[in-house]
Amino acid sequence: MAIFGRGGILTNSLVDRARTDVLGEFHRAGIATGALENVRVDLGWVCLDDAYGYYEPDGPGVILLSRVTLARRGEYLGRSPWTSVRDVLRHEYAHALVHHHPACVAAPVFPRVFGALVDAPGPVGPWHPDLHATPYAATSAGEDFAETVMVYLRGAPPVRQGATVLRRKLGYVAGIGARAPARRGRRTGQGSRHAQVVSVGGTLG
Ligand SMILES: [Zn+2]
């Protein structure tokens, strides 16, 4: 349902299709696990924070999305490119991967590649396209990892030959399937449950 600009209000069916597609991408990347399959995706109504989604690491984990969020105010007006719900889910499932399979972001390799431990607060350095997959990736090592997973799962990101830091980060993500102790889970294909969440606390973005 398109409104205002190029995007629209998220719906249950749109989120369900995106969830199935994104879990398929994790599966093809060799990093789908039973724990990730069990992460619930809840679609609430309105998010009054400047966030596209949250990952809550309680129990099996839950990804919280909203039909409308203030984070998209520029997108609703057609002033900013639309952020796909698939990109939001790629990012949030990367946080779920860290939650359930911390070995895949363990020291000493992870901080050598991303500049800090995955839970270190604050930016490692200023945003630069040769260093970070997106501007938001520069906010912390954990968000850098989530954004790098997002861009990697989109497929074949164009990266400048000289961008050795970003290439190393993408290579790190590509190697997770081989490094992580996570086991591939069965594909359930089950749809997400939908709670009515107005606004929640948690990790931004
Ligand atoms: Zn995030």
Image: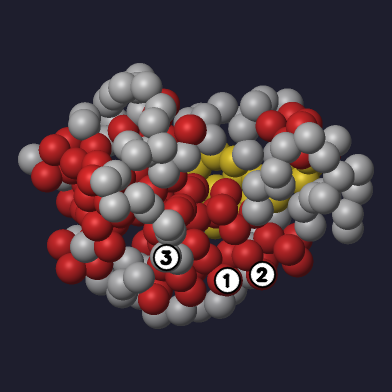
Residue 128 in sight from this viewpoint = yes
82 horizontally vs 88: left or right: right
Q: Is mark 2 on a helix, strand or loop?
A: helix
Q: In which quarter of the image is the N terminus?
A: bottom right
Measured along the vertical axis of the image, is residue 39 above or below residue 80?
below
Q: Which mark is residue 156?
A: 3
Measured along the vertical axis of the image, is residue 136 above or below residue 157?
above
Q: Pointer 2: residues within 10 angstroms few (<14), some, or many (20+)?
A: some
Please, what is the three-letter code of the amino acid marked with disc 3?
Ala
Query: Which residue is denoted by mark 1 in the rendering?
Result: 20
**Residue placed most toward the observer, 65 or 113:** 113
Q: What element carries label 1?
A: helix
Give percent across and percent down for residue 62: 52, 49
159 horizontally vs 161: left or right: right
Question: In the rendered structure, which disc, 3 or 2, sits on the residue that comes first in sequence?
Answer: 2
In 3D space, how far apart are the residues under numbered discs 2 and 1 (Cα atoms)? 5 Å
Query: Does the CB distance between marks 2 and 1 fall below 8 Å?
Result: yes
In 3D space, how far apart are the residues under numbered discs 3 and 2 (Cα atoms)? 22 Å
